[in-house]
Image (tube, coloured by chain):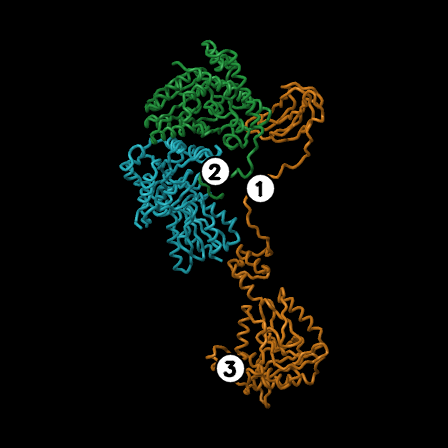
Chain colours: A cyan, B green, C orange
Amino acid sequence: MTQALFGEAINQATIEEMKRDERVFIMGEDIRRAVYGSTANLLAEFGEKRVLDTPLSENGFFGAAIGASLVGSRPIVETLTSFMWVAMDQLISQAAKMRYMFGGQATLPVVYRALMMYGGGAAAHHSDRSYPMFMNMPGIKIVVPSNPADMKGLLKTAVRDDDPVIVFEDGTLAGMRGEIPDGEHITPFGEANIIKEGTDCTIVAIAGSVNHSISAAENLHKEGISVEVIDPRTLVPLDKETILNSVEKTGRLVVVDPAHKVCSAASEIASIVAQEGFWSLQAPIQKVASEQVHIPFTPSLEKLVYPDVIKISNAVKNTLED
Amino acid sequence: MSIDKETLIMILTRMWIIRNFELKVMEVHSAGEFSGAAHPYIGEEAVAVGACAALRDTDYIAGNHRSHGHPLAKGGSVKKAMAELYGRVDGYCKGKGGSMHLADFSIGILGESGIVASSVPVATGAALSAKVQGKDFVSMVFFGDGASNQGACHESMNLASVWNLPVIFLCENNQFAVTTSYEETVAVDHISDRASAYNMPGVLVDGQDAIAMYEATVAAVERARSGQGPTLIEGLTYRYEEHSLGLGRVRRGEYRTTDQIDEWRKRDPINIHEEYLINNNIASREECDSIASDSEKLVDEAVDFARNSPFPEPEELFEDMWANPIPRP
Amino acid sequence: MSIPIILPQLGMGMNEGQVMKWLKSVGDPIQKGDKLVEIESSKVNSEVEATSDGILGRIDVEEEKVVNVGTVLGYILVQGETDNDLPAKKSDEVSAQEPDISQSSERIKRQSGKNKIVTPRARRLAKKLNVNIDQVEGTGSGGRITEEDITNFSNKIPNNVSLPVSSLPVTKTVKLERLRSVIAKRMTESSQIPTVTLTRNVDVTNAVEFQKNLISSWRSKKLRPQYQDLILKATARALSEQREANAHLVGDEIRLLEDINIGVAMAVTDGLIVPVIKNADKKSLLEIALEVRELARQSRSNSIPLDRMSGSSFSVTTLESYNIDTFNPLLNPPEIGILGVGNINVLPLYVNDELLPRSVGSLNLTFDHRAWDGAPSANFLNLVSKYLSEPSWMDE
């Protein structure tokens, strides 16, 4: 086991996978100079051919990654969630739909790593948490790690997976240190992590809100409330078995999601439990997600938007009102 | 350039196949044998056929909604094409793509896109892979005059140029985007003029002349394969039929004159090519007619094949989503 | 083969069309390209053309009908064909069932409890435990019925309620759906027996005093003495001295019973059960008291053993703590007597010409008049009264 920062975990995974498979190459804006840190040393290690700085044309180079993946390459594209909108046509019309509409002929082993900044005054255009929108469109696997070990393990799986994957890298975790197992550390898709066991209420939390939920659970424990915290780790595929089993045990569910609440990942999880876990429930399901407003610049307002420990604790207590 | 007879005959054969295929599609679609959109390639055959004749089987192409010409020009199966239009299990895409999404990855056809210009970055990416892998295949992408205004086109051309990618941008300028004339929407006189903005050669070609298309493409492929980067070729051609089947009934107002259509019909690409062959003693009238009737038979057989192919079963709805399958949500 | 006339997709996005007017009639000669029928749709109005020469053989879709694109509108007979070459007409069937590709979801039948808020989890448990939600009180917020409420309710009903038996010690256990129906049955039975109830208002001041004095000494045994404990002890002694009261009437037989087993009526949520203190005459007051507490505990958690639920020779039923002064208890057949215990009131009484406040409680003896008469039953009642009002003989 070694300690590493979230960004270091990304770097480790990238280097390991590029060493392991020469078909892997990486492209994105300013990655040679590693402006976001996670692509440090790649240029020195792998050279210009496999580490590409792109022009500012997401639609163009996202699509180029798709084309390259069709003919034998395994590209990784680094981007920000905010810059994905201009490339939606390539992501949806091509990446998501190609395999199915061509009757299974196309295999697209492409990975998009999308840095998700929010909470730090990045303002309206640079604070997108867009993974729920991609959940709705069939054809793309979606990864939302909450700690360095999972970040590394899931990114490695993503590169080895033959389908298009978007890995959402929560920017609020940039300073998080965590233990990473030594050796070949792979985290499979579709396996939720029960971070903390409990009996009174289940929290399912996504990405950056996992840590807030753990804090909330620890506080509630002091009040005699036993909370189970689950991190789904991947939204497509979603490990609903683990979630349903947990709600069967506790009878109560709070879903925490930093995305905007309408049609959030929390909405889908709540809906699944409402349908498939209805008879387990003691109390209504609670959703704690970001307010349905654009992200204001000023800190006095921005701090009101996202889920936090207090909102989460209150939601748990609401489920215990009976 | 002297072109061998085999290639010249192949060009004629494939043009006839496309022509008869499209005529038959119009007929059976009107008879209600299958529904959905279809965009006839009639009058533009020389563009795809001439260009694809310059490619190897291991080179890649991608295209757009006016899709039937491209796979057939690259030697794709006529039966599978027709079956795909009929939505049957034996089609290229098991019936899941339809007319606008023909693809045959086994012969390097990376698929036709329903969204115009959407496949331009994809083809550019295939060329990128050639470079990264150090292989010598090239890719070619077909797009229209309308598509040439899309951002994806410009981003791709810029990217291909700065990274020196082996891709040929082949613009099929049939002069109308549905009902809108390119003269009103394209800022430059010729789409091929846009190449200079991306520091690549731009070549304007008579799209009705298959040989001219062939020669221009051969040169572009040469450049690409030898590491000299991308080329933009504009094949100036004309669409005899409506943008899509049935459009004539719904549009309000005319956008072109019958005189114009007649003028261009006089420059039918198949006639031009046949004349060339006959005048240069490469093939006789009878041989040309025989090629025509053979292609008709081929298309008839394809229709029979399609009619007899079954529709996919309900269970197939959920197949072909994933290379590494995950549980159905 | 006749040629079908198919409704084509006349415009992109057209899904259906309405047949407006047939331009040809059945039997009319047709040339390829002739307009056969006018179609109107949301996208376009147009005609369907003949794809072949021939004769219009049959019209399958009448004017004004709306049909999907791809529907066969009729048939063209080609040269040499007759009506026999037309395919059989499809009846107006409902379109074939779309294959069900949805994943099945769990379904649980709805239960009663319409106007109560019941959590899904509670509903599921109620169904499993066969609890009628309508009978459950909700303790959740807003009167919500929770899982715990269901559990608690279910525990109060003993699963086994046995019927009295005519021969001891063999017991017969009959499983019942509900406690209530059993009680109902037995009460009906007993009400058909000719009974008389005798009442004595007994000065139990000394008993009350005696009971009070036991409090401190019983503290170490962790229980408080109850009035009913003294009653039981007194009754046991009276039964041992007047054995004819310790009997069953079965058919035409009065069976004097060897063992003095006193049934002690206890209230549960839904009704009444009567567990038995076996050989009460041989037990000390403390032993009786301990056993009563244990039975009470067991009755609350529905865990009274089978053999303690039957075999009583005489029963005692107390409404003392319910402020009832006197009442007519119903017999517990085939027993021939039952003692009902009433409330203790402090009343002014003359004791040796002195008017004093005295504790007075009623003892009500109902007896089966077929088995014994007023005189012996009165005697028995007096015995009990005596032993109760002067309890110093009761060993601790």
Farthest residue in the left direction?
A: A44
* Amino acid marked by disc 2: Met
Residue A228, relative to residue C299: is it above or below? above
Q: Quadrant of residue B31?
A: top right
**Dot 2 and dot 1 within a common chain:** no
Kind of element beneath mark 3: helix
Q: Position of residue C266 (x, y in %)?
A: 58, 73
Residue B62, relative to residue C168: is it above or below? above
Q: Which residue is mark 2?
A: B321
Q: In the visual, does A39 lie left or right of C353? A: left
Q: In the visual, does B177 lie left or right of C168? A: left
Q: Quadrant of residue C29?
A: top right
Query: Which mark lies nearer to you, 2 or 3?
Result: 2
Kind of element beneath mark 1: loop
Distance between mark 2 and mark 3 Cα atoms: 84 Å
Q: Residue at x 35, y 35 (%)?
A: A23
Distance between mark 2 and mark 1 Cα atoms: 20 Å
Q: Position of residue C311 (x, y in %)?
A: 62, 76
Graded by Cα atoms within 10 Å as few (under 14), some (14 to 19) or many (20 or more), the crowding at tag 3 reads some
